[in-house]
Image: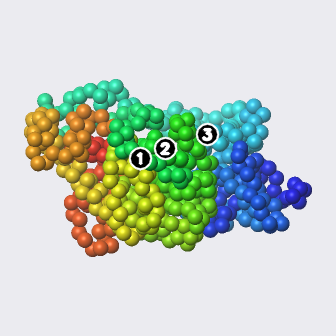
Amino acid sequence: MSTETMTYKLGDLVWAKMKGYSPWPGRVSNPIKDMKKPATTKKIPIYCIYFFGTNNYGWIDEANIKPYQEHKEQCKQMCKTANFKEACDTIENFISGGEVWEDNLDSNALFDKLKEEETNNTSSIERKTPKIKPKKETPKERKRESLTGSVGRPPKKQRTDSTSSNNRLGSLSPVLNHSATAKRPGSLLNRPTHISKPETPPLDVATVSQALKDKNIQASDLKFGFLGLGIMGSGIVKNLLNSGHKVVIWNRSNEKCNDFVEAGAEKGLTPADVVAMSDITFSCVADPQAAKEMVFGNCGVLSEITTDKGYVEMTSIDAETSADICEAIMAKGARYLEAQVQGSKPQAEEGNLVILGAGDRQLFDDCNSCFQAMGKNAIYLGEVGNASKMNLVLQTMTGICLVGLAESMALADRAGLQQKDVLEIMEMTSLASPLLTEKGKAIIEGGFPTQMPLQHMQKDLRLGLSMSDSLEQPLPLAAIANETYKHAKRLGYGTHDASAVYIRARF
């Protein structure tokens, strides 16, 4: 179709609506590399749209596009999610950044700058402002400036460096090992400043773990998609590739994909692309909200899922969220499986997870070679929801145990006992377990390297408590443990390992 008949031109800001989703702020753009225009019998123009906030692209027909400014107030009321609000802020920052073109920057250059910054996890571009002459100050403003440091605006507080070398956790400073001062009464002055999270070493994708070598896996002929390359997803995909599986990946931040692409993975531009390129797609993201966005969001799973495909949800979620996703997937004629995992970063990288499956039994069997690469056991638990419930029961148990460990180690420290002695003696008793030993060492060393993020542990406790509410089952210990994690999270330890709950227990 000739461009003369088209209503919108390249660069126009619009609201674009995909079937089944709310309108989303976007920009008429050129298609990116390898993005083919879909065949259509409709006699209306179709446009390539860049979606703000998500960095995704999609083909949208003219009937589902509206001018941005004209329909802004109306469309902003149609969705209330955090990602949608972020997308609206991003397009508004793009618009405001275009008021002044610094160094003759045109709108396309500004747009490219925005995309680059969005890829680097920057939520919005900086506003470009012209150089202007300072206005003359009135005597009243000069007096106010002498009191505040600037006209009409109080000076910003200096932010103290909370990650100084004195508090780095590779060394056992008196702030962290209190045995020498155990008999002092507790005081706010004795509390440590915020402890910086140790850097996570890069994952060596090419290294094959010994556990994987011992399994002798026969890789499936199917192609598998994988959405999410976080702490767990990265280790899982590493083992899928090293066991010979064909894998298509997607992650919100593109840079995490590079090493896996070099190792043989393909990369999809959007979750929808991954589904289109794969027979079975796995998802392993942060929480129930993120899991739903993968499925129901713009360029999400539902836009490409078909009757010959399967979808496997590995995100730690509640049974209700799993049921919602299952209903949507099955409405498209596709198959759905929960595959909840027990384990943390080391187990994911070594291929020693425990997988809890529920849902389509044939899909569970089709994923058998993948489960062999991921873990040491895969258990089928029946209908959808059972795996999510079982996972939350086990996570509740884990969360309570870690708070108990943290409080016991804090008590030993306060009593003047050496924490390493406590751990060594515990390992000789029936209390010994890999979990308590691993987290006990993290408490003693004070590093809290992230293997199971504290905020994810708190999220699972919250979901477990929600399940208990619906069943009218009291969980007093879980409720107390949840409050302890929440406090540690508020202190700034959400992205540290769950063992950082010790900071709340000790101080």
Rendered image: mark on residue 217: 1
The residue tagged 3 is 117
Q: Earlier in the sequence, mark 2 or mark 3?
A: 3
Relative to 480, residue 176 above or below: above
Residue in the image at 49% along x and 36% along y: 155
How far from the left and from the top, in percent, is residue 502?
24, 43
Cα–Cα span, label 1 and label 3: 41 Å
Relative to 469, residue 311 above or below: above
Number of labels in the image equals 3
Which quarter of the figure has residue 17? Answer: bottom right
Relative to 250, residue 213 above or below: above
Instruction: Please name which of the two marks, 2 or 3, marks the residue nearer to the observer.
Output: 2
The residue tagged 2 is 244
Residue in the image at 40% along x and 59% along y: 339
Tell me the amino acid under the disc marked 2. Gly
Residue 204, can we see it?
yes
Tell me the amino acid under the disc marked 3. Glu
Q: Are marks 2 and 1 in contact (CB under 8 Å)?
A: yes
Residue in the image at 30% along x and 31% along y: 169
- Helix, strand, or loop for circle 2? loop
Q: Nearer the viewer, residue 104 or 337?
A: 337
How far from the left and from the top, in percent, is residue 27?
72, 52
Number of residues whose C-alpha sits closer than 10 Å to that of mark 1, classed few (under 14), some (14–19) or many (20 or more): some
Q: Are marks 1 and 3 in contact (CB under 8 Å)?
A: no
Q: Earlier in the sequence, mark 1 or mark 3?
A: 3
